[in-house]
Amino acid sequence: MPIATPEVYAEMLDKAKRDGFAFPAINVTSSQTLNAALRGFAEAESDGIVQVSTGGAEYLSGSTVKDMVVGASALAEYARVVAAKYPVNIALHTDHCPKDKLDGFMRPLIKISLERVARGEEPLFQSHMWDGSAVELHENLDIAAGLLEECAKARIIMEMEIGVVGGEEDGVANEINEKLYTTPGDAIATAEAVGVGEKGRYILAATFGNVHGVYKPGSVKLRPEVLKEIQDAVGAKYGKDKPFDLVFHGGSGSTLEEIREAVSYGVVKMNIDTDTQYAFTRPVAEHMFRNYDGVLKVDGEVGNKKQYDPRSWGKAAEAAMAARVVEATENLQSAGKKLG
């Protein structure tokens, strides 16, 4: 199937919300991690979301080029070709874009999609995330309103964040404190600023103790009931059941019970990055340790070309990451539920 059209992406999210499951959104940084994600979704018979962060996009452009727009565009074009060979729908998304990178990442990508749509083509990406967690809420919402208007013109769904996800990702670090929990007041202010769908579709990353990266059990307290509280508060005011399409960030280390509870409150997308990074790298480390005298030219020897050929360890890395994607679809209950 081709990359999801805006209509198919909307249908994917609607089905998830209606049927009580969520899509894994897999961060990728290369063609090979993209292929691993596609393989995992196909093996699970799950539609899915592939996403790239600012750092991932910069890396994709080449370590000397370091152009986020070039890297993101290249990924999107490559994905369009290879994803067509898989029997699932894949949406393309850009992850966390803070204020200081809007003009160098999200806004230029929206402009590319506007130009594509004007020519009768599909947008380059199906959704983009504005991360206003580092600024005050009023500024966050003011910027979000303007971006939502542009995204709607480009037939793109916007993702935004209220509250703060702790930990560190792509150089953005946040403390673990009370700001990790979005309040009903924050949610009502959001609905007042950007609507509940009538001004353009968006998905909302509301925080309930989420932390990026790896953390030990007990160091962070997830409170999924926060999501119910904000849905109820805004739903009562606007007369809509579960008015927000929610996103779960910083889920590494979460229990299956916490994940399923969050999904029951309207989460339709859960970001997966740290776990798939490890899944990809672990077989590579094993290959190098087991075959060190083959991948290295030790003591003047010639090594073993079959063992240092990147394909020899790359295939194992791809398979392991794909298996972790399958696990994510099972946890989020999207497995076997691809659109007909």
Image (cartoon, rainbow, N blue to C red):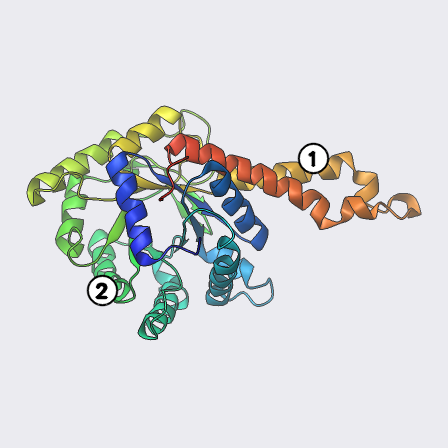
Residue beneath disc 1: 286
The spot of residue 161 in percent (x, y) is 29, 49
The spot of residue 321 in percent (x, y) is 55, 40
Q: Indicate the amino acid at tag 1.
A: Glu
Q: Residue furthest right?
A: 300
Q: Is residue 11 among the parts visible in the rendering?
A: yes
Q: Is residue 208 left or right of residue 75?
A: left
**Quadrant in which residue 107 is drawn:** bottom left
Q: Residue at x 33, y 72 (%)?
A: 120
Give SS at disc 2.
helix
Residue beneath disc 2: 149
Q: Indicate the amino acid at tag 2.
A: Glu
Q: Nearer the viewer, residue 169 or 315?
A: 315
Q: Residue at x 43, y 25 (%)?
A: 217
The spot of residue 172 in percent (x, y) is 42, 50
Q: Is residue 179 among the parts visible in the rendering?
A: no
Q: Nearer the viewer, residue 59 or 98?
A: 59
Instruction: Identify the mark nearer the N-term, 1 or 2.
Output: 2
Say whether marks 1 and 2 touch (CB < 8 Å): no
Q: Nearer the viewer, residue 99 or 154?
A: 154
Q: Indicate which disc residue 248 carries.
A: none
* Above or below, comparing residue 118 to residue 158 in the picture: below
